[in-house]
Amino acid sequence: MAGTFTVTLDLTETPVLLAGGAAEQAEALLAAGARLRVVDPAPAPALAALAEAGRLTLHRRAVLPADLAGVRLCVVALEGAAGEAVAAMARAAGVLVNAVAAPPRAHHGRASLVGAGPGDPALLTVKAVRALETADVVLYDKLIDPRLLDLAPARARRIDVGKRCGRHAMSQAAINRLLVAEVRRGGHVVRLKGGDPFIFGRGGEELEALREAGARVEVVPGITAALATAARLGMPLTHRGLSRSLHLITAHGRDAEGLPQHDWRALAVAGGTLAVYMGARTLPRVAEALLAAGMSPATPAIAVENATLPGERRIRRTLADIAGAVAEAAVEGPTLTLIGEVVALADERGEAARRAA
């Protein structure tokens, strides 16, 4: 049996090829000073993000002999025959080879990131219902209507991860770890999220964590608040002659007072419909930014709290006074604000009829 020994290399400004692998392996090589090239047919999102940031070169394909030109070290993080073939190719080219363990793969379980829609259980999609009906574990948020959990089998475990209005029972990093851990236990894990997982729901981070772990994962879209609210109001979000674009923005910054760095002037002059998510507390600053950027104070605006739910409330004003009206109403539930000329098309008769009912 052949012996082994440890070799220490100075990788400062050294061309290194990483075949497959995870972001953690790439980060370690970058920290050692390597000029890193990664070749992976299906790179994890975190690895792709490093390439987008300009920290490494990424090729989304199988390793070719030309990839080894000028390379001093080839780190192979591929399993089975694929890894053996790359290692043999590197040795034939006179390149040092380091075979490392491939990222752990969660082969047994699977995950579904499911959009629960705006609140009304009747707006759940058929595909979302089917996902819940086959769930072994459901991780859900505070905004989920409790009746949706009854769609899961009685044997299914239900885990409240409790994210709402800045009061988190569990951090996003902890939720990501829990998702991966549950998938590795086997079975079907459903992550049930309000609205749509990919619209201000941090579903992208959860998808990235699951893919990084090698989990099988699907995304089931949900009806997002802007679409549901407009439907309830009987108003179009786009309309010929009034609005040819729709802009979904969040007004939730990293702290209680901050706003994201939007291009407010571009939003003000676009002439489309603006849907402001998570903006009840920062609405005064949103309105101030839009007014300062040139949007007319008379632009119609409406804020809707708990859209599609029995406790739905609507506050209809103009851009100049919508923030004050929302503050006076002391909204507590999730509130979406629509701003634009199409708001004037909201059906007052339909609204009155619903209130009377």
Image: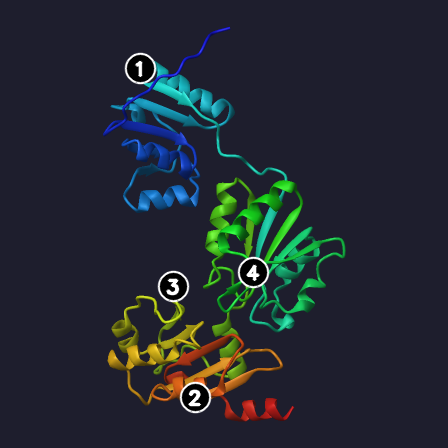
Read off the residue under disc 2: 325
Disc marking residue 169: 4
Kindly identify the residue that appears in the image at 42 percent across and 45 percent down: 45
Q: Earlier in the sequence, mark 3 or mark 1?
A: 1
Res 85 seen here: yes
Q: Earlier in the sequence, mark 3 or mark 4?
A: 4
Kindly identify the residue that appears in the image at 50 percent across and 44 percent down: 211
Q: Would you say the residues marked 1 and 4 are in contact, meaning their CB atoms lie under 8 Å apart?
A: no
What SS does tag 2 mark?
Answer: helix
Q: x and y percent of residue 348 in the render? A: 51, 92
**Residue nearest the viewer, comparing 193 with 232:** 193
Amino acid under label 1? Gly
Amino acid under label 4? Ala
Q: Earlier in the sequence, mark 1 or mark 2?
A: 1
Residue that sits furthest to the top in the current view: 1
Disc number lying in front (3 or 1): 3
CA gap between label 3 and label 1 equals 50 Å
Relative height, residue 53 to residue 61 (above, below): below
Q: Can you tell which quarter of the image residue 150 is in?
A: bottom right
Q: x and y percent of residue 338 in the render? A: 42, 79
Res 86 seen here: no
What SS does tag 1 mark?
Answer: loop
Amino acid under label 3? Arg
Read off the residue under disc 1: 94
